[in-house]
Amino acid sequence: MSEKYFFELKSIEQFPHTESFKIGNEFFATDDKQEIEGGDLSVSVTAKRLGEGFSLDISLKGKVTVLCDRCLNPLDIEIEATDSVRVKDFDGMEYDDDDLLVMQVAETGVDLEWRIYEMASLALPMQKVHKDGECDKKMTDILNGYADTGKESKDSDDIDPRWDALKALKDRINN
C-alpha cells in the first residue's frame, strides 16, 4: 500500500469532500508501471457518502511521457480521464465488479495508486507516434530500409515454386 496515494475515508466529517494533488515522474518510476515513462498530472478525488459506503469521482488531467511506437524516442501526450468507483466495507462476499473497491474492516480508506495509473494508461491513444516528420530521422531511415528490403524480396525469383500452382489456379478463377 502506498501511503502517498491513500485516500482516507472514515475520518471525513463533511461530504462531499474533495482532495487534489499532483503526480510527477516519481509516480511512474516503479517497475510495474512500464508503459508510461513519466508525466505531470493533476488529480482530483471527490468523496460522497452513499448509505454505509462511499462514491469516489476521480479525474486526472495533464501530460504523460511514453515511447513513440515508431522511433522509440520520448513522446509527450496530453491526457484527460474521469472515473467513478464505489467503496464499501468488506461484508464477507466476493464481488466481480471493476467499479467497486472493498475495504477490509481495519482499513480507514483506499489506496488509489494503481487505479490512477490504470486511468492514465487507458487514456492513451492506441498508436503513440510523433507527428509526421518529428520522429528520429536515424530510426526512420533504418525502418525505411527494412520496408524497402521487404518489397524487393517479394518481387525476387526466390519464391517457392510450389506457390506457382496456387497462383495459376487463382488466375484461372479470376479470368
Image: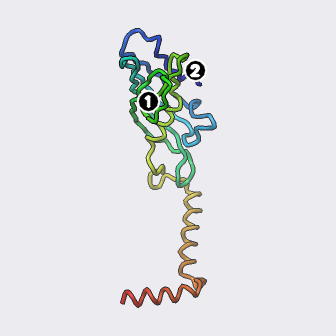
Q: Nearer the viewer, residue 63 or 110?
A: 110
Do we see residue 63 in this rendering? no
Residue 98 point in image, percent of width and height: 44, 35
Residue 17, percent from left and from top: 39, 16
Per the image, label 2 sits on a secondary structure element best described as helix
Q: Nearer the viewer, mark 1 or mark 2?
A: 1
Question: Which quarter of the image is occupied by the C terminus?
Answer: bottom left
Residue drawn at the location 39% of the way across and 26% of the way down: 57
Per the image, the residue denoted by label 1 is: 100
Give the residue drawn at x 62%, y 34%. 30
Picture quadrant where residue 13 is located? top left
Whether residue 160 sits left or right of residue 52 in the image: it is right
Decide which of tag 1 and tag 2 comes sooner along the chain: 2
Quadrant position of the N terminus in the picture: top right
The picture quadrant where one finds residue 145 is bottom right
Disc 1: CA contacts within 10 A as few (<14), some (14-19) or many (>=20): some
Residue 3: numbered disc: 2
From what the image shows, is residue 72 above or below residue 31? below
**What's the CA distance linking mark 1 and mark 2?**
20 Å
Q: Residue type at mark 1?
A: Leu
* Residue at image location 46% in from the left, 16% down from the top: 9
Numbered circle sitting on residue 174:
none
From the top left corner, tell me how far across and down residue 35 is, in percent: 55, 43
Give above or below for 43 relative to 33: above
How many numbered tags mark residues here?
2
Q: Is residue 146 visible?
A: yes
Mark 2: which amino acid? Glu
- Secondary element under disc 1, as helix, strand or loop, is strand
Which residue is the extreme one toward the front? 92
Q: Residue furthest right?
A: 31
Q: Is residue 21 left or right of residue 73?
A: left
